[in-house]
Image: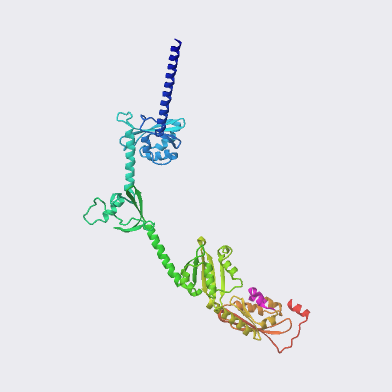
Amino acid sequence: MKAVVIEDLLAAVAMVLTATLVALASLALMAAWQMRRPCRTSSIFSAQGPAAAFLFDGDRLLDATPAARSILPEGEDGGALSRLIGTLGPLFPGLSQALDTLPRAGLIVIASSGDVQPPLVLKGEYLRGLTRLTMIQAAGDGQPGPGDGAVLAALQHEVLAQRVILARSPVVMWKEDARGQVVWANHAYLIRATELLPDRQDLSWPLPRLFQTTEPSGGRTPRISLQARSGLEWFDLFRVSAGEEVLHYALAADAAVEAETALREFMQTLTKTFADLPIGLAIFDRSRILQLFNPALADLTALSPEFLISRPTLSAVLDAMRAKAMIPEPRDYRSWRRQVMRVEEEASAGHFEETWNLPGGQTYRVIGRPHPNGALAFMFEDISSEMLRTRRYRADLELGQSVIDAVEDAVAVFSQGGQLLMSNLAYTRLWNHDPAVMLSDAGIGTLSAWWRNHSAPTLLWDDAIAFVAALGDRAPWEGEVRLLDGRLVTCRLRSLPGGATLITFRARASEAVVPVRDDIRSLLSA
């Protein structure tokens, strides 16, 4: 009896262990099957919920039904509410203002505009800081209808809006299939295609191609002209692949073509002007590479056009000019060249300008000017004839001064304004002063005061001032004055061409010079 009980107990334990193992195996199989199922994003909206419902936290989208996501424009969830307002705004007037009042009101209901078919209703709820928007179709009996109609109406409205935008766009747009045939075109394309048709012929499918070449050449956007009734039109063409089809956009480029034509004509005029200039012009970019020069530069620097066309650097140009003895030979050429290359840095304190006396006898004026974007311009001007005229003029002045210095009489020449122009050595000896040291103040008034202080009292100096200042024809006259040392001096005044005045002083050599005593000199001075 006891053995039977033990056998029954062992059978029960075996059954329990078998059931436990079966249960564990079933759980393991279910867990493996759950792990192999694809991960699905959970949503707070049930499948039986409204077809178009959104949940926002501020401007950020937290959740939406699949139908609602089909309405929402693509983009980041962070600005989803703003994008949704832009999409649903035309359907629901005053949507943006109503949403601003939602946190205070807690609930808003907005009906769609009258042109939306079927009519829609947008319900907004403010739930503990979250915003839930639900869009449903309004049924004829006033009860909410199925939500799929609301989604369909919204999508239809968006399609119609995009169709209007494309049709009224001034940009020429069309689509081509894999064979290159035009399968769609907007209104701007159709207008131009109609203008190109022969008389009494209508458009037919496939549409004619306005532009035969749309492939970019050399990686650059193609620019093609089109002859329209209003005249020649220019377009920049752009291609966007969309699967096997290609979208084309033709942007108007008339303004750009006109600007480029005007710039090209201006550059041609500028080039012709530079070509006729006698001044050599060389423009270097910020890397100090020669970018522009005129023919006069080759003539003045003795550099070959081939060398200049090769775009040498500023250092290479200076070295080539030095090899041809077209720059003055400095003691330290390297430091001088560095100084020239730093002209842009030194331009803040003053412009670079030097006069070069070349070994061949020519004289050049070289001017450097900084230009925008780090460019640098050099101008070479041959001033040899100007310097020759200056030297001749200076030599003539020196010769005239030598001639007047050889005259025994003291001479002083005044301009029409009473300024001293010239005096000789005899004048310096007679009046014991050289007016050249105070030439800026050497007027008839200043010199007559000097003469009055070194001669006996007389009214002759007042008459001399009036004679120099007088205009028109003046009759020559003369007078006598006695110096403080007793000498008698004859003064002669006569007019010269251009309103100038010549005054000569001659001391009478026949009379003995009687020195005036100091007491008499002081009396005469008083």
Q: Quadrant of residue 253?
A: bottom left
Residue 115 falls left or right of residue 309: left
Residue 303 placement (x, y as % from top left): 49, 73
Query: Seen from this angle, which residue lies furthest bottom?
Result: 510
> What colour-coding does the image apply?
rainbow
Up-down: is 482 above or below 239?
below
Residue 164 visible (yes or no)? yes
Q: Quadrant of residue 346?
A: bottom right
Query: Seen from this angle, which residue lies furthest left?
Result: 200
Residue 203 placement (x, y as % from top left): 24, 52
In the image, 483 versus 320, the foreground residue is: 320
Up-down: is 43 above or below 450?
above
Residue 432 falls left or right of residue 117: right
In the image, 297 versus 95, the foreground residue is: 297
Residue 170 visible (yes or no)? no
- Which region shows up in magenta? 433-448
Question: Which residue lies at the image location 59% right of the left edge and 79% below the top edge?
Answer: 394
Q: Quadrant of the N terminus?
A: top left
Up-down: is 358 above or below 284?
below
> In the image, is residue 440 part of the stretch drawn in magenta?
yes
Q: Quadrant of residue 354?
A: bottom right
Residue 155 falls left or right of residue 368: left
Query: Seen from this angle, which residue lies furthest top?
Result: 1
